[in-house]
């Protein structure tokens, strides 16, 4: 099966202007999922960016789940979920973070990550960086050995990297 290269994967990502609100250009990655060859190529490319020491993938709701599950199958690394309020059934710890207006919260099962874990946070888009920075803080609170992040794409002009405390990689930059 011929795989797509990163440029071909990038060309599948659609710009949707004014979604979810005016002024935002939403990066729609769902065409990648609708083409199995593109999705396996993406998982392949992303797997090359996973540092050797990683022991746990931490997936951010909800497109991060799709990427982390593919990566878990490919690499045999376990993955766990970071979710919005009221979704996880067992004992959780939470982090609050600032939005443009107000605050939001994210949750993880407190048993999901251990202090010996070398964590890789996985999400689709690094935009302002607020979400990933909050998940970094969750991992820090769980005293993990190390934290890094991996994104399918980065909106570099939003300087989200400035909010991140630890190393990160992105496959595609806009
Ligand atoms: P942020 O906290 O600003 O870095 O936003 C990260 C989260 O919001 C990611 O989980 C993305 O799924 C989503 N997101 C933010 N901006 C966009 C965008 N322009 N296109 C698609 N998704 C976005």
Image (tube, rainbow, N blue to C red):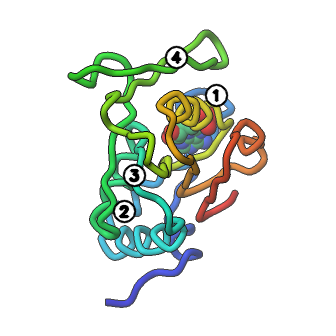
Q: Mark 2 = which residue?
A: 71
The image quadrant that residue 162 belongs to is top right
Q: CA distance from mark 4 to mark 3?
A: 24 Å
Q: Residues within 10 Å of mark 1 (few under 14, many from 20)?
A: few
The span from disc 2 to disc 4 (Cα, nearest Å) is: 27 Å
| Residues packed near mark 2 inside 10 Å, few (<14), some (14 to 19) or many (20 plus) | many
Measured as percent of width and height from the top left, residue 83 is found at 37, 29
Residue assigned mark 1? 22
Q: Earlier in the sequence, mark 1 or mark 4?
A: 1
Mark in front: 1 vs 4: 4
Question: Label 4 CB, ligand 1: below 8 Å?
Answer: no
Q: Residue at x 69, y 40 (%)?
A: 164
Mark 2 or mark 1, earlier in chain: 1
Nearer mark to the viewer, of 4 and 3: 3
User: In this figure, what is the number of numbered marks?
Assistant: 4
* Mark 2 Cβ and ligand 1 under 8 Å apart: no
Return the residue at label 3: 56
Please tell me whether mark 3 or mark 2 is closer to you in this view.
Answer: 3
* Displayed quadrant of residue 76: bottom left
Closer to the chain start, of discs 4 and 3, is 3
Distance Cα–Cα, label 1 vs label 4 = 21 Å
Farthest residue in the front direction? 116
Label 4 residue SS: strand
The numbered mark, 2 or 4, whose residue comes first in the sequence reads: 2
Which residue bears the numbered disc 4?
104
Q: Is residue 109 above or below residue 86?
A: below
Q: Mark 3 or mark 1: which is in front?
A: 3
Crowding at dot 4, Cα within 10 Å, few <14 / some 14-19 / many 20+, comes out as some
For the residue pair 172 and 29, the one nearer the viewer reads as: 172
Q: Is residue 16 left or right of residue 65?
A: right
Q: Are marks 3 and 1 in contact (CB under 8 Å)?
A: no
């Amino acid at each position: 099966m011929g795989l797509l290269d990163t440029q071909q994967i990038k060309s599948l990502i659609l710009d949707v202007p004014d979604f979810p609100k005016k002024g935002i250009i939403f990066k729609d990655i769902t065409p990648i999922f609708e083409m199995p060859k593109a999705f396996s190529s993406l998982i392949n490319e992303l797997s090359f960016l996973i540092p050797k020491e990683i022991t746990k993938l931490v997936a951010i709701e909800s497109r991060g789940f799709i990427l982390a599950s593919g990566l878990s199958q490919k690499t045999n690394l376990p993955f766990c979920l970071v979710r919005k309020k009221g979704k996880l059934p067992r004992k959780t710890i939470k982090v609050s973070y600032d939005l443009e207006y107000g605050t939001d919260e994210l949750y993880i099962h407190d048993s999901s990550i251990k202090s010996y874990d070398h964590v890789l946070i996985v999400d689709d888009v690094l935009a302002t960086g607020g979400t990933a920075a909050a998940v970094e803080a969750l991992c820090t609170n769980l005293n993990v050995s190390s934290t890094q992040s991996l994104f399918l794409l980065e909106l570099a002009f939003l300087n989200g990297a400035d909010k991140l405390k630890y190393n990160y990689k992105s496959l595609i930059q806009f």
